[in-house]
Image (tube, grey):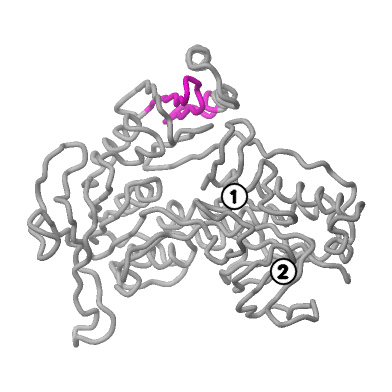
Amino acid sequence: MTGLPIAVVGASAAGLAAAEALRRFGWRGPLTLIGDEPHLPYDRPPLSKQLLQGAWAPEKLLLRTADQLAPLDLDLRLGTRATGLDVAGRTLTLDGDVGVSPLAQGRERGTLRCAGVIIATGVAARTLPGADRIAGVHTLRTLDDALALRGRLANGGTPGSEGVAAGGGGRRLVIVGNGVLGCEAAAVARELGHEVTLVGIEATPMAAAVGTEVGELLAEEHRARGVRLLTGAVDGFETAPADPAGGGDRRVTAVRLAHGGTPAGEGRASGGVAAGGGGAEGRLLPADLVLLAIGSRPGVDWLDDPALDTGDGLRCDAYCAAAPGVYAAGDVARWDHPVHGRPLRFEHRMNATEQGMAAARNLLAELAAEASGPAGATAAAGAEAAAPAPERRPFAPVPYFWSDQYAVKLQAYGLTAGADRVETTVLDRAARRALALYGRDRSAVGVLAAGLPPRQVRALRAVVAAPLPWEEARERIAAALAAG
């Protein structure tokens, strides 16, 4: 192979889907898959569920084994970070090609000129200043993050090893952030017997994603399971020497709240201890462990080419193209959804796979067009042509996400965040069974089911596959429920 490669930057679900689709759609040229973690591509949703709980070994998260990847004939560069992209030249700058083959371009070490690039760098966990230097304060985005927290939950605070079964119990865990990740981790930790406090800026867990009424239903379940819910902002951490002799890193002993720490949903402050900092209204939440689940930031810090728009992810057109020959997929991509008529970015597992495939298909279509015409022929000349030449298609998925908390399973289609109208029907409060319809600009755009059978949930998908007049959607939802 003497042609230029297609490079996929990001070796998680979206990147792997893109690489596999490139081969399936006919790319026979060099194919480079770049991942900054040392692990083979793995699945992330179980990190805050089965893996954290100890029910699954890390190997079960692998999306493909090394043997399964072999037929793709990948130039697989794990432990390698992309640090720059020259858009006009379609040239990547790479750092840290540990354990992989040398760059085969015959050019300056660390650069890789490409026929095309698919960016699937996902998102990174947000943290708080100085938190990374405090033992016992964790984030939960990567496999290594999850294993570190699992080890602490499993054996009472001493770091464990891979494969250690969880179940130590009895630790005081404060989770900062009451979104999806924070709620899922709270459920797991509580089931393991730990004392869990869930702190969020918003009074209702997951309200931004699912609305207040569904969020309140979840809050009731967490309270019933013994989770303490608080509303407040974090002012800082109290620490003590990790080493009794006073040396080494410091470990967390408490979370300091700045604004009173009001019990979520009760509208008044109670409990806690007056803080030594953060003002008279501050409180201390004693903690052996802290999980920061305060959101994520798209992995675009390395993209400084002015040809790219990196505000809230990498901006793309309806075909997932960020620039000629440069596409994006997964959590990092913010693209013009052709059905909803506005740029959207989803951190959803299914979207990662679907968008990876769409980006691959559309990139190949563009390269085929370049190879057949004068424009861009140089970039494509070194690569074997993809065949047959497909046509580019707008990427127009029906968004889907799910969340498991205790025995409650939430499943949602369409858009639930950013709704200006939500109608929630609680079918069985004790069992946390509910159905919610989400609207925007007088159309129904999303639907969520809690505790409904899969057959009913699947029937709801068609209702919000495209924005539907609100009353018509209500009628169709009622019919779907009546059908059982």
- The foreground one among 77 and 201 is 201
Direction from residue 386 to residue 471 in the image, left or right? left
Q: Which residues are magenta?
A: 433-457
Mark 1 belongs to which amino acid? Arg
Residue 167, percent from left and from top? 33, 59
Q: Residue at x 61, y 77 (%)?
A: 95
Identify whether 84 is placed above or below 425.
below
Q: Which mark is residue 315?
A: 1
Magenta span contains residue 443: yes
Question: Looking at the figure, which quarter contains the N terminus?
Answer: bottom right
Residue 321, percent from left and from top? 69, 49
Residue 64, percent from left and from top? 66, 59
* Location of mark 2 (residue): 91
Q: Which mark is residue 186?
A: none
Please, what is the dominant secondary structure of the magenta stretch?
strand
Q: Residue at x 56, y 69 (%)?
A: 37
Mark 2 belongs to which amino acid? Thr
Q: Residue at x 77, y 64 (%)?
A: 31
Q: Residues within 10 Å of mark 2 (few under 14, many from 20)?
A: some
Q: Residues within 10 Å of mark 1 (few under 14, many from 20)?
A: many
Task: Please tell me whether mark 1 sits on a helix, a strand or a loop.
Answer: strand
Direction from residue 403 to residue 67 in the image, left or right? right
Mark 2–mark 1 Cα distance, whole angstroms, equals: 19 Å
